[in-house]
Amino acid sequence: MTIEPTPHRLTTPRSLIEAGLAAPERLAELEAVAGRYAIAVTPALAALVRPGDPADPIARQFVPDARELIRDPAESDDPIGDDAMSPIRGLVHRYPDRVLIKLVAACAVYCRFCFRRERVGPGAGALSAAEFAAALDYVGAHPGVWEVILTGGDPLTLSSRRIAETTRALAEIPHVKTLRWHTRLPIAAPERVTKAMARALVADGKTTVVAVHANHPRELTEAARAACRRLSAEGAMLVSQSVLLKGVNDDPETLIELMRAFVEARVKPYYLHHADLAPGTAHWRVPIARGQELMRLLRGRLSGLATPTYMLDIPGGRGKVPIGPQWVRSDGEGTHVVTDPRGAAHLYVDRLGADSRSGANSDTLA
């Protein structure tokens, strides 16, 4: 599989400097980072950067930083343990009811905090026709697989024709009911999300979900929202993926604006990820306690429709778990202390029927 090129991307340190996204005196620093990790910034995202502002939340996500070359001992080339859960190349089977297929290893834009940053970039390759066929065989041989997640890299960097071929091939597997595509393209290159591409993602009798990645409300431009509407209009369900990042969205006002912007773009806020232990990403990570406090504040100020789940992907392939604030403390005897969104505590006691208290099953017929 080969990707469709995105024109006029900034892919070198010099191009970033010439576009005003970085100061000329940073050239050596940028080149050092570029020697290890891929760089690409699309015109849509470059236009959002505030030149000369070192704290700009868009620049922090996409312009290289010398701190990326500082590696914490706990950081890993494979922080979420994909390799340990990959029975064949390009396929991860971590949960019983779903598999993940990495169609391509390239993206339209390279996030500096990417948890697959050691595996993606120009020349990193993609699944061959034989490898994709093997993935289809694997899915077909596992009837418990209800959902297939297409990722990479960014699978929407493929042509609409290749996307349609992938959709059709997976739709032919009867027990696969849901296809989920993870992408940044509606944000990074919204003009490429055409009606033809949106149609290519959808198959009769299957549910198509598109997980849209954005971390700051400024990313959800009118062009990005229009791209999301095109996906929605062709029948895709849209959910969000965001990463909690220091200096980007680690304050309640930014998160509230971001989540509301998602809903306004027909995207259901889904996951707010705690940043993974990818190499050179410590300067983006936020303490879990701060993330929990932010989620407590969001619960008190946001509609449930706009509230994501704060998630940690346990290192080593152990899977994702919610790590939001705890609202209930229980004594094990049916008495609970419940904290409301304003922080006040309230007593709540289970009130169960006589059959429940005695341990009898009220559904059992005499």
Image (cartoon, rainbow, N blue to C red):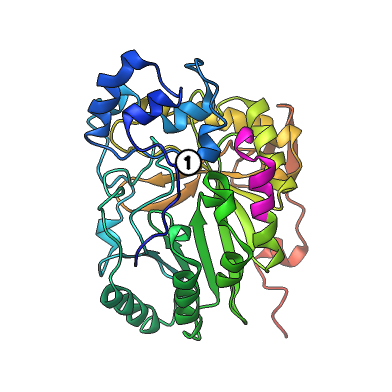
Crowding around mark 1 (Cα neighbors within 10 Å: few <14, some 14 to 19, many 20+) is many
**Residue drawn at x 70%, y 26% as measured from the top left:** 343
Q: Is residue 322 above or below residue 24?
A: below
Measuring from the top left, give residue 266's x and y in whole percent.
Answer: 71, 53
**Residue drawn at x 44%, y 78% as measured from the top left:** 144
Measuring from the top left, give residue 285's x and y in whole percent.
Answer: 42, 29
Question: Which amino acid lies under the numbered mark 1 shown in the image of this protein?
Answer: Thr
Magenta residue span: 217-228
**Residue drawn at x 71%, y 64% as measured from the top left:** 233
Residue 340 visible, this angle: no
**Which sits in the foreground, 177 or 5?**
5
Q: Quadrant of the N terminus?
A: bottom left
**Which sits in the foreground, 92 or 130?**
130
Residue 298 horizontal side relative to residue 39, left or right: right
**Residue drawn at x 35%, y 60% as measured from the top left:** 104
Residue 177 horizontal side relative to residue 276, left or right: right
Residue 287 horizontal side relative to residue 67, left or right: right
Instruction: Characterize the magenta stretch by its predominant secondary structure.
Output: helix
Measuring from the top left, give residue 78's x and y in whole percent.
Answer: 27, 47
Residue 140 horizontal side relative to residue 46, left or right: left
Q: State which quadrant residue 47 falls in.
A: top right
Asked if residue 105 lies in the magenta stretch, the reply is no
What residue is shown with label 1? 42
Helix or strand or loop: what does disc 1 sit on?
loop
**Which sits in the foreground, 32 or 173?**
32
Asked if residue 224 lies in the magenta stretch, the reply is yes
**Which sits in the foreground, 126 or 306?**
126
Q: State which quadrant residue 8 falls in.
A: top left
Q: Is residue 12 above or below residue 98?
A: above
Q: Quadrant of the C terminus?
A: bottom right
